[in-house]
Image (cartoon, helix red, strand yellow):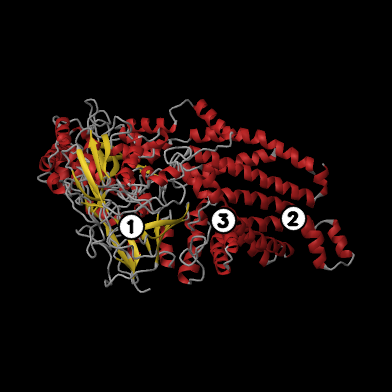
């Protein structure tokens, strides 16, 4: 019976170690922290050099919403002064320090936080999966390199259809073949759309983006019909106009897979499908999948027949998973990899301006906010608008960026990040709260609070997690608490475990003040304001307890507006109400960083993390 | 002997059955569920209900358990809730990496630990012995995470003589995976250079992971050798004028080895399931990290089936230890 005891002991030990270990950090595709959309880097901006092969382009569409999610990853955090990064700025960054003519050849080993959760693009929703899969598979349209609000055709050469339309016609690029040699045609596209719409229930949990963009699954969802009008034309009819449709299908999960491969891998059968696990040749992208070892490596090699402007410059691209940011940096320093994503904020100094390395700042497409809930506690001082305004004025956003983001970030004046194509129209004339402790004290005094009777609030932060928008929850909490106390608040701190306790409690509206954040799925204001403040059966979102006269009507109106100008103005109205009432205090848009050796040329970062390696090349080999 | 092994194998059935229930209950007791992991910030009550339903988590617990057992009895260990990957495949792909790493660690532990234990035992009380005790204490208490990062900093970055992470240099070598034991696969591929590279990749993680077992093996060996050295038959052997090398080898070590073998078996079993930190910092794709991720993401299916498979292997290793015990000591065989 010693055996039984040692066995039980083993199980207990394994479970205990795992349960106690520092969870959140660095989630792996599907780890607590990760979440559909959010996992993933976030990033910076367009680029200069080398347009990137892009595609015939043809733009068109109008509004926006691209998106991708952001990887989860996490970063240890630490504080650390700012040095590094000018942060923000604008157009962004790509790499070319040396410039010159692209060199063909070489192998680039690149470190991410994890490999793909699944090799079936439709079943992924995190940035680490997208990093690999978008080199192999392609959707009909995609974001232009470095942008979040400009679409280019990829498999579609051109398309007709506006946000106010219900019919979209895609003219496919001719002569494109999948890696297995079969041709891309309208039937192939239809086969993929049909597959997604009819996903078995077991798949639906993982097909987050299809469900989100198409409003669920099955014959009742947004898609009314998908027709192969002729060999190279696909007509998609929607049940109602959807401003997020076009940018939604630019996401990696909407990549078109060879029907022959779908069939040979039993891709529709949840218990038998091998599309998510086997190395298959089902894509059209610039790289083909050569080898895949779970948790070890994904090896991609150049697709010589690529239909884009040019085949990839790299012979091979190897993606390696380093869950720990410190180990990732060591691998770069040891020469095992030549590039890595999601550098820890504290480690930016190790590569920024250091000889032999380059740091690419990926501008934020996320926002950290402080939820301010007037109804969480009976008789809360936050019920008064002036007190909520005092909270927002009390916070030194630049100080937080310097201390916790390695300087990579920008103050969040409003919820929507400046990288959004909607930023100008939505932010226009909206009240913003500068760091002004005196103003905060005055507001509190006017509301009848003073040193004798300070406003008492509880303030919560999550444990076992980091996020690109929240690199160090405990440190941020301490810093913000100090700022609040500085102007006269009396703060009762609290913490809870991220996925299992914190999120449910925050969403139930149990906290006076709490940290949370968001990374955009689509570049549409509805994905920011609508998701958070939308009413459900006449009730405001419990998380913020923000029941303001006119808010529900304003959101409904904004949701229904299809014309770009009207839509911008309508969401501007929503943002104005929320800002002036301070339903939350938006704090920081956190940038992420890509570290490369100076050999790596022409890496173009995108705030959404949607980045292709087709234009990347290695110098000096 | 056959009967002994058979009896032990039969005992496995009730043990494993009980284990499935135990693990099932444990996973359900963990706060949170996979739907929260999948949804993260998007975990609104409506979204949660949808995802739970599609994962079958809305069923009563008893039904969930029966379904799991039903699959198990048909040899189906299920698919991950998070990745939808087949659990057995994932396990089999990763387990060779874990075995390789554990063996490397145990290689260091045994080849260094036993001689060191013997050496210090024979110099009991001398300063070398005391130094050994202090060093082994440090070995037991140093965090693997820290040790691993330090080893890498020293031997891969400051003095780049060893690779920092991974199982082989993927830029230089393309090795078809046959067994997933890198050392074996490189030999199958007939690439000796790759074989050497694979061995070099084992050194730092093996050292990091082997430190604790090394310290334990050394201390147990020392204690056990000291005991045996006091036995009458050792004194007799010396009195008979046997060369001291022969006394040490044939009489002392052989008799002192029993507890050491037990510890080696237990430690190997623990390594197989517990190399989480080493696997994380050395980007080593083994089962430790896999199960760790499954627990943090509440991927019930992976936890249940992964731990079950590990437990099965743990039991088998223990069986092997018992059998080798019986070989070393006939008294056990006949009892």
- Look at discs 1 and 3 and give the one toward the viewer: 3
Residue B41 seen by the camera: no
- Residue found farthest to the front: A230
Q: In the rendered image, which residue does mark 1 sit on? A: A345
- Residue found farthest to the right: B240
Q: In the rendered image, which residue does mark 3 sit on? A: B178
Disc 3/disc 2 C-alpha distance (Å): 36 Å
Q: Does mark 2 fall on the same chain as mark 3?
A: yes
- CB of mark 1 within 8 Å of CB of mark 3? no
Q: Find residue A89 and report its horizontal and vertical position in percent.
A: 19, 59
Mark 1 falls within which chain?
A: A
Label 3 sits on a secondary structure element that is loop
> In this picture, is A350 found above or below A533?
below
Mark 3 falls within which chain?
A: B
Mark 2 falls within which chain?
A: B
Most foreground residue, A30 or A343: A30
Residue A57 seen by the camera: yes
Residue A519 lies left or right of residue A204; in this view the side is left
Most foreground residue, B75 or A9: B75
Question: What residue is rendered at 54% in x and 46% in y?
Answer: B91
Disc 1/disc 3 C-alpha distance (Å): 40 Å
Question: What residue is rendered at 67% in x and 50% in y?
Answer: B265
Q: Find residue A244 and report its horizontal and vertical position in percent.
A: 22, 41
Q: Quadrant of residue A565?
A: top left
State which quarter of the image contains the N terminus of chain B: top right
């Amino acid at each position: 019976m010693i055996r039984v005891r040692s066995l039980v002991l083993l199980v207990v030990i394994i479970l205990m170690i795992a349960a106690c270990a520092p969870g959140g950090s660095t989630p792996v595709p599907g780890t607590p922290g990760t979440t559909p959309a959010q996992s993933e880097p976030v990033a910076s901006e367009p680029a200069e050099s080398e347009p990137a092969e892009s595609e015939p382009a043809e733009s068109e569409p109008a509004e926006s919403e691209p998106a991708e999610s952001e990887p989860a990853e996490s970063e240890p955090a630490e504080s650390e002064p700012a040095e590094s990064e000018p942060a923000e700025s604008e157009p962004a960054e790509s790499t070319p320090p040396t410039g010159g003519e692209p060199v063909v050849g070489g192998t680039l080993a690149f470190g991410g936080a994890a490999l793909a959760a699944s090799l079936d693009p439709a079943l992924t929703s995190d940035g680490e999966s997208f990093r690999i899969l978008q080199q192999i598979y392609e959707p009909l349209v995609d974001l232009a390199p470095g942008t979040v609000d400009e679409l280019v055709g990829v498999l579609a050469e051109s398309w007709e259809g506006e946000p106010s339309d219900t019919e979209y016609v895609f003219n496919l690029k001719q002569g494109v073949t999948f890696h297995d040699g079969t041709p891309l045609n309208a039937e192939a596209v239809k086969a993929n759309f049909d597959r997604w719409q009819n996903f078995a229930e077991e798949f639906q949990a993982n097909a987050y983006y299809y469900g989100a963009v198409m409003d669920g699954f099955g014959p009742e969802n947004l898609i009314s019909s998908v027709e192969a009008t002729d060999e190279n034309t696909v007509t998609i009819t929607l049940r109602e106009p959807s401003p997020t449709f076009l940018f939604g299908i630019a996401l990696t999960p909407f990549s078109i897979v060879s029907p022959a491969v779908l069939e040979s891998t039993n891709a529709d059968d949840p218990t038998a499908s091998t599309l998510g696990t086997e190395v298959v040749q089902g894509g059209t992208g610039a790289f083909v999948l050569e080898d895949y070892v779970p948790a070890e490596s994904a090896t991609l090699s150049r697709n010589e027949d690529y239909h884009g402007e040019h085949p990839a410059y790299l012979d091979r691209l190897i993606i390696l998973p380093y869950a720990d940011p410190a180990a990732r940096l060591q691998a770069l320093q040891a020469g095992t990899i030549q590039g890595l994503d999601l550098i820890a904020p504290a480690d930016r100094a190790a590569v920024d301006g250091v000889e032999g390395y380059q740091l690419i700042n990926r501008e934020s497409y996320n926002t950290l906010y402080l939820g301010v809930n007037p109804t969480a506690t009976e008789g809360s001082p936050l019920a008064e608008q002036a007190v909520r305004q005092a909270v927002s004025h009390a916070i030194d956003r630049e100080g937080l960026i310097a201390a916790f983001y390695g300087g990579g970030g920008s103050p969040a004046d409003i919820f929507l990040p400046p990288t959004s194509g909607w930023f100008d129209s939505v932010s226009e004339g909206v009240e913003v709260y500068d760091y002004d402790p005196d103003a905060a004290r005055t507001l509190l005094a006017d509301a009848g609070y003073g040193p004798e009777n300070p406003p008492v609030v509880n303030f919560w932060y999550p444990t076992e997690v980091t996020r690109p928008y929240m690199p160090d929850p405990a440190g941020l909490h301490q810093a913000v608490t100090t700022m609040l106390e500085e102007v006269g608040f009396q703060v009762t701190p609290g913490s809870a475990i991220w996925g299992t306790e914190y999120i449910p409690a925050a969403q139930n509206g149990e906290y006076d003040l709490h940290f949370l954040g968001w990374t955009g799925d689509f570049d549409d204001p509805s994905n920011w304001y609508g998701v958070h403040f939308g009413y459900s059966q006449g009730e405001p979102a419990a998380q913020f307890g923000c029941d303001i006269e006119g808010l529900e009507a304003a959101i409904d109106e904004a949701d229904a507006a299809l014309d770009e100008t009207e839509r911008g103005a309508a969401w501007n109205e929503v943002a104005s109400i929320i800002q002036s009432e301070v339903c939350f205090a938006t704090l920081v848009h956190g940038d992420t960083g890509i570290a490369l050796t100076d050999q790596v040329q022409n890496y173009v970062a995108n705030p959404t993390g949607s980045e292709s390696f087709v234009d990347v090349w290695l110098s000096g080999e | 002997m056959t009967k002994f092994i058979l009896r032990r194998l039969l005992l496995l059935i009730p043990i494993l059955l009980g284990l499935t229930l135990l693990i099932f209950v444990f996973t359900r007791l963990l706060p949170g569920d996979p739907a929260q992991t999948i949804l993260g910030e998007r975990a609104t009550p409506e979204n949660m209900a949808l995802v739970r339903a599609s994962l079958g988590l809305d069923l009563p617990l008893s039904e969930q358990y029966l379904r799991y057992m039903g699959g198990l009895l048909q040899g189906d260990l299920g698919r991950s809730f998070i990745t939808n990957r087949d659990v057995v495949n994932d396990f089999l792909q990763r387990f060779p990496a874990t075995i390789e790493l554990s063996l490397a660690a145990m290689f260091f532990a045994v080849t260094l630990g036993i001689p060191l234990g013997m050496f210090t035992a024979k110099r009991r009380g001398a300063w070398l012995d005391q130094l050994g005790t202090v060093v082994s204490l440090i070995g037991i208490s140093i965090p693997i995470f820290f040790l691993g990062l330090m080893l890498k900093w020293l031997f891969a970055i400051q003095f780049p003589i060893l690779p920092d992470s991974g199982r082989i240099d993927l830029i230089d070598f393309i090795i078809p995976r046959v067994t997933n034991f890198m050392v074996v696969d490189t030999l199958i591929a007939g690439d000796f250079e790759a074989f050497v590279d694979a061995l070099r990749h084992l050194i730092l993680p093996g050292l990091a992971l082997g430190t604790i077992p090394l310290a334990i093996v050394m201390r147990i060996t020392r204690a056990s050798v000291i005991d045996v050295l006091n036995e009458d038959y050792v004194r007799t052997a010396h009195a008979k004028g046997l060369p001291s090398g022969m006394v040490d080898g044939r009489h002392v070590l052989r008799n002192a080895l029993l507890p050491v073998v037990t510890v080696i078996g237990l430690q190997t079993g623990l390594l197989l399931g517990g190399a989480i930190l080493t696997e994380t910092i050395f980007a080593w794709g083994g089962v430790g990290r896999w199960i760790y991720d499954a627990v943090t993401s509440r991927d019930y299916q992976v936890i249940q089936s992964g731990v079950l498979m590990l437990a099965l292997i743990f039991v088998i290793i223990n069986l092997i230890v018992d059998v080798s015990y019986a070989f070393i000591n006939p008294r056990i065989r006949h009892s």
